[in-house]
Amino acid sequence: MRKLLNTLYVTTPHAYLSRDGENLVVTVDDQERFRVPIHNLEGIVCFNYAGTSPSLMSLCCEKGVSLCYLSESGRFLARVSGKISGNVLLRRKQYRVADVGAETAGLAKAFVSGKVLNCRSVLLRFVRDHNEKEGAQEVAEAAERLLGYFKALDSSLSVDAIRGIEGDAARAYYGVFRHLITEQKDSFAFRSRSRRPPLDPMNALLSFLYTLLMMDCASALETVGLDPQVGFLHRDRPGRLSLALDLMEELRPYLVDRLALTLVNNKQVGPNGFVKKESGGVLMDPDTRKLVLTEWQKRKQEEIVHPFLEEKISIGLIPYVQSLLLARHLRGDLDGYPPFLMR
């Protein structure tokens, strides 16, 4: 099991990243602001960066530290990483399975099953804790529909049919998501899921956190030797991290949606922390982005008992455990891939 190290988030617009021996150095206006040994990091994420020295890029690749670049809004731009680790035989098996309809459908079904059940758990938790709130009945009905979609996955289906069920389940879930917002309902009104760009503060918060989760999933897959670009549920596209998107589907409700709702309902973030652009897109301001990153890191440090391993792990290790289980399934050590199911 890998140690859960830290991710460095560089949010200062004019920060320049360079190398000094085995250290990462951050300078702003030619003044050193931060220094850390590279072995203390597992990843570096830069927002609106000024630049990175080639020497530091080389060090990151050598030490297995991923270097990611995001736009100010949190949109993924690029990722620099070293050689992919792991057995070439595992990656060849991954590519073969991705080309076989029945095996691909089996994995796609597992990812979607995990997503549907975890979304249902989020809704049922709201009904249990806020049964007297407006919309509780509608949320309960949506939870029952999600159960129906899960049962529909039991039959032999093509990947396209599984994608259709996933889309229907997502619409049912996001269709009642507004009721899960119990505080600041007007400021964080949620009508539907919007991306590229997000059109309201809640969507901006979700999109930002989903991007962070996707990067964690991509790093985890590379750690066990899988290719994050070759997926089973999401279609292959140039530059698309399809397998990372597959893996994050089952993790979205537990790792992101619950955190986003907590931040809003506890009033840790407010409407003044978001800016609407002329294009209609909504962005977080720098202070809100830093707060969200801090809470994301805190969340990853919390511990749970993994439902399949029945061992206590940090929440931040869930993508790595699931990647390991996926690799074991592809190698033939597990009969099926067990998705992560929240309790």
Image (tube, rainbow, N blue to C red):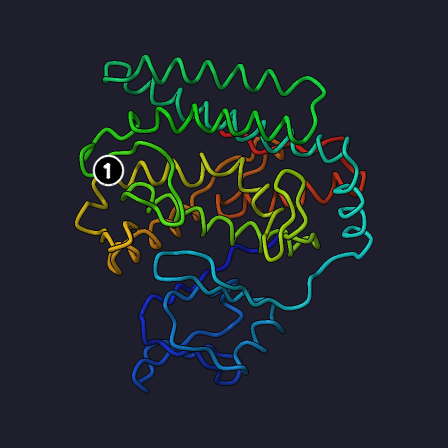
Q: Amino acid at mark 1?
A: Phe
Tell me the quarter of the picture where residue 151 sits: top right
x and y, in percent, of residue 150 in the image: 57, 20
What's the residue at 63%, 46% (across, down)? 243
x and y, in percent, of residue 197 in the image: 36, 49
Q: In the displayed structure, does residue 96 sit left or right of residue 132? A: right
x and y, in percent, of residue 46 in the image: 42, 66
Tell me the quarter of the picture where residue 29 sits: bottom left
Q: Nearer the viewer, residue 210 or 129?
A: 210
| Picture layout, residue 22 above or below residue 260 | below
Q: In the displayed structure, does residue 128 sit left or right of residue 172? A: left
What's the residue at 74%, 38% (across, down)? 329
Q: Nearer the viewer, residue 313 or 285?
A: 285
What's the residue at 49%, 25% (across, down)? 169
Residue tagged 1: 188
Secondary structure at numbered mark 1:
loop
| Picture layout, residue 240 above or below residue 11 | above
Within 10 Å of the Cα at label 1, are there few (<14), some (14-19), or many (20+) other Cα atoms? some
What's the residue at 32%, 76% (across, down)? 14
Q: In the displayed structure, does residue 281 sit left or right of residue 214? A: left
Q: In the displayed structure, does residue 91 sit left or right of residue 171? A: right
Q: Nearer the viewer, residue 210 or 194?
A: 194
